[in-house]
Image (cartoon, rainbow, N blue to C red):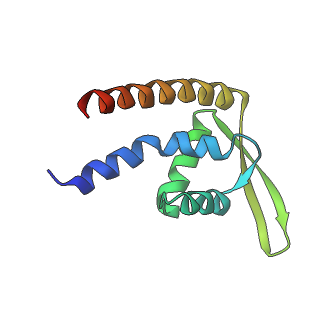
Amino acid sequence: MKTENTKAQMRKGVLEYCILLVLKDKPQYAINILQVFKESKLIVVEGTLYPLLTRLKNDGLLTYKWEESNQGPPRKYYQLTDRGENFLNELENSWNELVGAVRLILKKSA
């Protein structure tokens, strides 16, 4: 089994959660989301991000608004809907439970 495949699956499993986390406090332009990921050492390309943003929007978790830009065409800023905020809260609880369980397993196996 190749570790790269497993690592890719792990990243894919948390990308939606990470997108929602980035959008938690304020609307963001897609390139800003990619920048936050890059700074966090989570490398994601536009071809991965945009379909996820579309799916989250179609699921009612995100909405967007167009804003004029000083540097070219208008930009689409994504933000959480009320449903998205509730979903993020559920994911945060699940994430914390999962991390706690993995830590316990790590302690017991050490």
Give me the residue at 53% from left, 39% from top: 17
The percent coordinates of residue 77 (x first, y second) are 74, 53
32 relative position to 3: left or right: right
Relative to 61, say whether 53 is above or below.
below
The percent coordinates of residue 54 (x first, y second) are 57, 47
58 relative position to 13: left or right: right
Give me the residue at 58% from left, 62% from top: 39
Task: Judge by depth and name the residue closer to the eye, 46 or 98.
Answer: 98
98 relative position to 105: left or right: right
Relative to 60, say whether 79 is above or below.
below
Q: Residue furthest front?
A: 110
Relative to 66, say whether 82 is above or below.
above
Task: Judge by depth and name the residue closer to the eye, 4 or 97.
Answer: 97
The percent coordinates of residue 34 (x first, y second) are 59, 60
- For the C terminus, which image quadrant? top left
83 relative position to 46: left or right: right
Q: Residue furthest left?
A: 1
The percent coordinates of residue 97 (x first, y second) are 46, 24
Give me the residue at 32% from left, 30% from top: 107
Task: Write down the quadrant of residue 69 in the picture.
Answer: bottom right
Give me the residue at 73% from left, 56% from top: 76
Relative to 62, say whether 34 is above or below.
below
